Image (cartoon, helix red, strand yellow):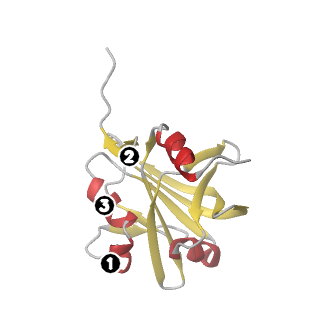
Amino acid sequence: MAIGDDDFKLCMGSWVSGVTILTTRSGEQIHGMTVSDFSGASLSPPLVTVCCSKDSVTTGLIAEGKCFAVNVLAADQQELSNRFASKKYEDVRFEGLDYSTAKTGAPLIRGALARMDCKLEATHDAGDHVIYVGQIVAAEVEEREPLVYWNGAYRQLVPVD
């Protein structure tokens, strides 16, 4: 018997993670959402995985467009994380946002500390989510502090002496 939703959330809340905005394009339509379920999967070839709710608009567009970008947020991008996480702002997430277009067509958010342009390699069904595997075809990294999330709140990194 599986654990309940509350126990699952409690367990997963103990995992410290960075915060990303996953973006995609299908034709002329772009979309994106905040995602913390992101991981490196393979060095050769360079693969990443992202877990996306099946009921998200972004999830459907990734399947259609066969591409996505992972934008790893910097410490000063908490507002942006909140905007892309809220259904309330779903239709205006990109308004006024400074972004460029990747090789695949996915939006790359300027100011993010890392931006990975990915072509879709594989899709795996996982309960109420879809696991996408993407091959990184281009990447950019900036020297900035990351936005960190733990136990239901944004956190700051503190160097250990």
Calculate the distance from the C-alpha at mark 1 to the C-alpha at mark 2: 25 Å
Is the residue 17 above or below the residue 98 in the image?
above
**Along the line of sight, the residue nearer the viewer: 121 or 20:** 20
- Residues at badges 2 and 3 in contact (C-beta under 8 Å)? no
| Label of residue 92 in the image | 1
Q: Which image quarter is the C terminus in? A: top left
Mark 2, secondary structure of its residue: loop
Q: Earlier in the sequence, mark 2 or mark 3?
A: 3
The Cα–Cα distance between marks 3 and 1, rounded to whole angstroms, is 12 Å
| Label whose residue precedes the other's in the sequence (3 or 1) | 3
Secondary structure under badge 1?
helix
Q: Amino acid at mark 2?
A: Gly
Tell me the quarter of the picture where residue 82 sits.
Answer: bottom left
Identity of the residue drawn at 64% across and 48% down: 46
**Residue 3 rendering spot, x and y as whole percentages:** 64, 46
Direction from residue 96 to residue 149 in the image, left or right: right
Task: Name the kind of residue labelled 1 in the image.
Answer: Val
Q: CA distance from mark 2 to mark 3?
A: 17 Å
- Nearest to viewer (mark 1 / mark 2): 2
Q: Amino acid at mark 3?
A: Leu
Q: Is residue 93 left or right of residue 107?
A: left
Q: Which mark is residue 152?
A: 2
Q: Residue at 48% across / 83% down in the picture?
A: 29
In the displayed structure, would residue 80 be above or below residue 106? above
Residue 68 x %, y %: 55, 65
Disc 3 target residue: 80
The answer to the question of whether label 1 and label 2 lie on touching residues, with beta carbons closer than 8 A, is no
Find numbered disc 3 in the image and state the secondary structure of the residue it sits on: helix
Residue at the top extreme of this rendering: 161
